[in-house]
Image (tube, rainbow, N blue to C red):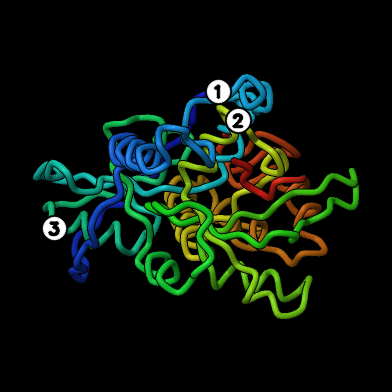
Amino acid sequence: MRALQLVLTLLVATAAGLRVPPPSMMGRAENRAAAKSAKKKGGRGGGGRGAATPMARNDVLPREVVEKRMSEVPVFRISGTKPVASGTPNLFLDAAEAEAAAARLGAGRVECCTLDKVYFNQGNIMQPSKRAIDELSRTPQRMTPDVIVPVFCIDGLQVDDKGTGDSSLPLFFSRSELLEFAKKCMEKPEARVMVTDLSVVVQNMVQGPVGLLRGARFFPSEASLKYVDGVIAKTKQQNALFPSEAGFATSIADREQPDAASENTARRKSGGLFGGGGDGGIFPGGGGGGGIFPS
């Protein structure tokens, strides 16, 4: 997978202050949570967090496949005149919260990047959206006891690609957007919503057992996609040689959040959020049985 060829930067002059919730730390915090979980279970491990068994090691996805799926999720990295304080987030899943945090650094800057480029760097700290944290508190069906970055799903909800016949399991970073999506496919999905941690999903994909996650797809929040749309449109306008070059026929948000019947067709035509398939994207080169997350 080629490196991301374009990083868009938005200068944040001022932004309303938002109190940043306790940070979620990828790598370090997740390692502590995994150790705590394993200790509770007598060192046996479980849910993809413990040592992989030989069977689990055979039931994995190639790293490049996992990274390509993660490349569909925009992440917002902050910087400024003052450095980001140690132990506080430098990455956000919510653009507005990123702007607010960046403004407090002085001459704050928000960079749009993708999850695959930052997730595996243990020096990063990622903050889930406040909405996701609130939705986590209202979701009793937890598939792992330690949830840092919430990922919501519904067991049995799958999207079929009419062209290939392939099925995918939708994984949302927003419970409300998952329900909006699911109501088009099933009746009364509210009671069936489950939540797990992003680290569990990624670890099961990379280290196994991948199980039904083999066909999983990440759905970033609509707000984050619209924010990226705005940054791309603004940048294109600034760089356009002719006024007609500054327009977009279809927004990323429209392409990435279509209805259940046509969303895969839309993705194939657009090439996804950051490229890597179809006719090309905005950023070229972006990259049964025991339940959804088997123990």
Q: Are marks 1 and 2 in contact (CB under 8 Å)?
A: no
Q: Position of residue 179 (x, y in %)?
A: 62, 72
Distance, label 2 to label 3, CA atoms, is 41 Å
- Residue type marked 3: Arg
The x and y percentages for residue 244 are 60, 55
The percent position of residue 116, horizontal first and vertical second, equals 48, 35
Q: Residues within 10 Å of mark 1 (few under 14, many from 20)?
A: few
In depth, the one of 30 and 22 nearer the eye is: 30
Q: Which residue corresponds to mark 2?
A: 208
Q: Which residue is mark 1?
A: 2
Q: Position of residue 157 (x, y in %)?
A: 74, 61
Q: Quadrant where the C terminus lies?
A: top right
**Amino acid at circle 2:** Gly
SS label for mark 1: loop
Note whether 117 is above or below 19 in the view shown. Answer: above
Q: Nearer the viewer, residue 187 or 234?
A: 187
For marks 1 and 2 on the same chain, the one whose residue lies earlier in the sequence: 1
Q: Residue furthest bottom?
A: 188
Element assignment for label 2? loop
Q: CA distance from mark 1 to mark 2?
A: 25 Å
Residue at image coords 71%, 76%: 183
Q: Which residue is mark 3?
A: 104
